[in-house]
Amino acid sequence: MLSGEFRHTLDPKNRLFIPAKHREELGESFMVVRSIRNNCLQVYSMEEWSKYIAPIDKMDRKDSERIFRALHRNATQATPDSQGRIVIPVSLLQHAEIVKGAVVVGCGAYAEIWAEEVYDKTLEDENLDDIKSVLESFGL
């Protein structure tokens, strides 16, 4: 289970440190993809990525091909170096608006990587009462 919030700096070679606890959960290599809903990146273990995309295989072929293309064209399979850093391609950095500071956030089955400024703004705008209402509607 991926959890916690970790702030790190992107180095001049576009490398970002991935926390040791997350690397343990994610495995030797993992997928880094653009989030469809937010200006951030999502990080999945290979097993969780397979689960995430499995329903797409059941779609009509013309839809599945289009969706797979959209999901994979800027995705990268990352393997941390000996210091726990991964290289993030420019296209993914641009999507997430990451220039220097980044936040790695555990979200259970996946992690997110945010530009520090964007993440902080997102937290400022977060309405905990709305989250509470949603949880309560599910009996939590």
Image (cartoon, rainbow, N blue to C red):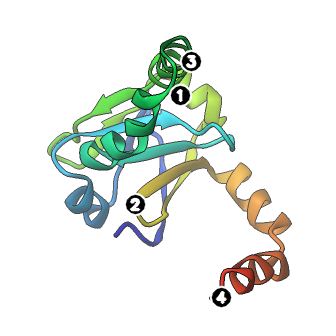
Question: Label 1's element?
Answer: helix
Please identify the quarter of the rendering in which residue 86 is found: top left
* Marker disc for residue 139: 4
Instruction: Kindly identify the amino acid type of the residue bearing the numbered disc 2.
Output: Ala
- N-terminal label among 1 and 4: 1
Residue position for label 1: 92
Instruction: Kindly identify the amino acid type of the residue bearing the numbered disc 4.
Output: Gly
Pair 3/2: label in front: 3
Q: Residues within 10 Å of mark 4 (few under 14, many from 20)?
A: few
Instruction: Kindly identify the amino acid type of the residue bearing the numbered disc 3.
Output: Asp
Q: Residue at x 14, y 45 (%)?
A: 82
Residue position for label 2: 109
Instruction: Kindly identify the amino acid type of the residue bearing the numbered disc 1.
Output: Leu
Question: Label 4's element?
Answer: loop
Residue 5 coordinates in the image, percent (x, y): 50, 68
- N-terminal label among 3 and 1: 3
- N-terminal label among 4 and 3: 3
Residue 38 coordinates in the image, percent (x, y): 69, 44
Residue position for label 3: 63
